[in-house]
Amino acid sequence: MPYLRIQTNQELGHHKKQELLQQASSAVATGLGKPEKYVMVSIAPTQPMVFAASDAPCAYLELKSIGLPANKTKDLSSVLCKLVHETTGINTDRIYIEFFDAPREMWGWNGGTF
């Protein structure tokens, strides 16, 4: 049920994308205390982005999950920013993360909802 979408203006090679996908999946599962078999992570195609009036490398992440408690967002932000920085070189002050706690009835899976 957790879904992390990563968008950046920095070109990432295949190896870097795979590394980021795998590590982000594990980090989200651990950070939310949910089985990794339910975690989905995607990296959007590289796109033009400007942050603070600069097109220097930046990233925008969206993390959606059922039961995403507000008291976990600070730790998740720290872990995800560090992971993106270590994998891509993007400075953590050029990363935004949007957190969203989805209601169970608004999250579909396997022909139903949670």
Image (cartoon, rainbow, N blue to C red):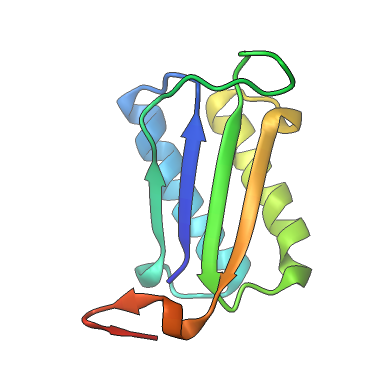
Report which quarter residue 31 is drawn in.
Answer: bottom right
Q: Is residue 5 above or below residue 99?
A: above
For image coordinates 69% across by 74% down, the residue present is 69
**Residue nearest the observer in this picture, 60 or 71:** 60
Could you tell whether 5 is left or right of 108 in the image? right
- The structure residue drawn at horizontal position 44% and vertical position 74%, both measured from the top left corner, is 35
Quarter of the image for the N terminus: give it: bottom left
| Image position, residue 19 (x, y; %) | 41, 38
Kindly indicate the quadrant of the structure image that contains residue 99.
bottom right
Q: Which residue lies at the image location 55% right of the left edge and 22% below the top edge? A: 49
Q: How many tags in the picture?
A: 0
Going 67% across and 35% down the picture, which residue do you hit?
95
Which residue is farthest left? 111
Give residue 61's position: percent from left, percent from top: 56, 44
* Residue 32 percent coordinates (x, y): 59, 70
The image quarter containing residue 114 is bottom left
**Residue 101's spot in the image, x, y percent?**
60, 71
- 111 with respect to 73 (left or right): left
In the picture, measured across the screen, residue 101 lies left or right of residue 13, that is right
